[in-house]
Amino acid sequence: AFNAAHTIVDALESVAAQTHPEIEHIVVDGASADGTPEMIERYGKHVSRFISEPDRGIYDAMNKGLGLATGEVIGFLNADDVYADNGVLERVSAIMAKDDLDVLFGDAEFVSPTRPNQPLRRYRSERFRPGRIAWGWMPAHPALFLKRSVYERFGKFRTDYRIAGDFELVARIFHSGTLTYRHPPEVLVRMRTGGISTAGWRN
C-alpha cells in the first residue's frame, strides 16, 4: 500500500472475510502520509504483521512481504483490489493441495474505481502458456498464487523494474519448464482501474 486510505479498508475486509482458516496477512506500507497507516491500525485487526517505512517501489515492498511470510502459498493483493468472494483462498488452497501444484492462477475483473461492483472488463488468464511469455502474455498478478518454495528456488522480484517486475518473475520461473500449474476458469480478484499498471496502453 501507498497513500491508499480511500481503498485500503476494502482490501483489509476482503482478506478478513475469507473462510480459509489459516491466513497470514502481512501488510507492507510505503510510509504513506494520507492516513493509510492509521486506517490499517484501525481496521486491520486480522493483520498478522504490519510495517510502514519508505521503500524503493512496489517490488521492493513485495520483497519485504516475502521476507516476512511463513505460509506455504503466497499471494499478493494490492491496496485497491479485493477478492471476488469470501471463499477464494479456501478454494485456491484446496486445489493446490489436491493437485500438488507449484502455481495456480485465475482471472481478474477490472471494476470502476468509484463503483467497485460494476465490472468493466475481464482479464482471462486462460490464454497464458509459458510459450507465450515472449508475446507478452502473463497471468493476472493479483490472481497468481505461488508456493513459497518457488521463490526460494528462483528468487524474489527484481527491483530495477518499475511496473514489469511481476512479468519478469513469471518469465523467470516458467522458463525452467519444471513447474506444475493450473488455471481454474473463474474470477479470483477484482481490481479497480487507475492503478499504475492499468493507467493506459503505454504501461
Image (cartoon, helix red, strand yellow):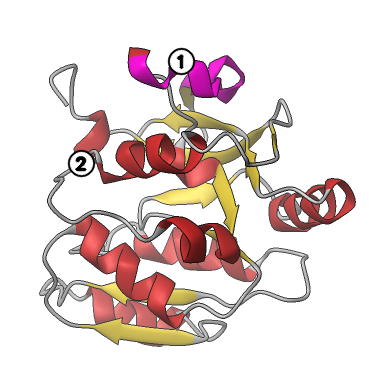
Mark 2 or 1: the one toward you: 1
160 on left or right of 195: left
| Residue lying at 17% horizontally and 27% vertically, measured from the top left | 203
Mark carried by residue 82: none
What is the spatial separation of the Cα atoms under label 2 and label 1, in whole angstroms? 19 Å
127 on left or right of 133: right
Label located before the other in sequence (2 or 1): 1
Q: Secondary structure at mark 1?
A: helix
Other-residue count near label 2 (Cα within 10 Å), few / some / many at <14 / 14–19 / ≥20 = some
Q: Is residue 99 visible?
A: yes
Position of the N terminus, as image quadrant, is bottom left
| Residue lying at 33% horizontally and 77% vertically, measured from the top left | 39
Q: Is residue 131 magenta?
A: yes
Q: Nearer the viewer, residue 78 or 168?
A: 168
Mark carried by residue 163: 2
Q: Is residue 23 above or below residue 88?
A: below
Residue 134 lies, in percent from the top left, at 35, 17
Q: Is residue 129 magenta?
A: yes
The residue beneath circle 1 is: 132
| Residue lying at 50% horizontally and 77% vertically, measured from the top left | 69
Residue 84 lies, in percent from the top left, at 62, 43
Q: Is residue 104 above or below residue 182?
A: below
Could you tell me the amino acid type at mark 1?
Arg
Residue 146 lies, in percent from the top left, at 58, 53
Q: Is residue 132 above or below residue 57?
A: above
| Residue lying at 18% horizontally and 21% vertically, measured from the top left | 200
Q: Nearer the viewer, residue 147 or 108?
A: 147
Specify the segment rendered in magenta.
121-134
Q: Quadrant of residue 143?
A: top right
Q: Quadrant of residue 16?
A: bottom right
Q: Residue furthest right?
A: 98
Could you tell me the amino acid type at mark 2?
Ile
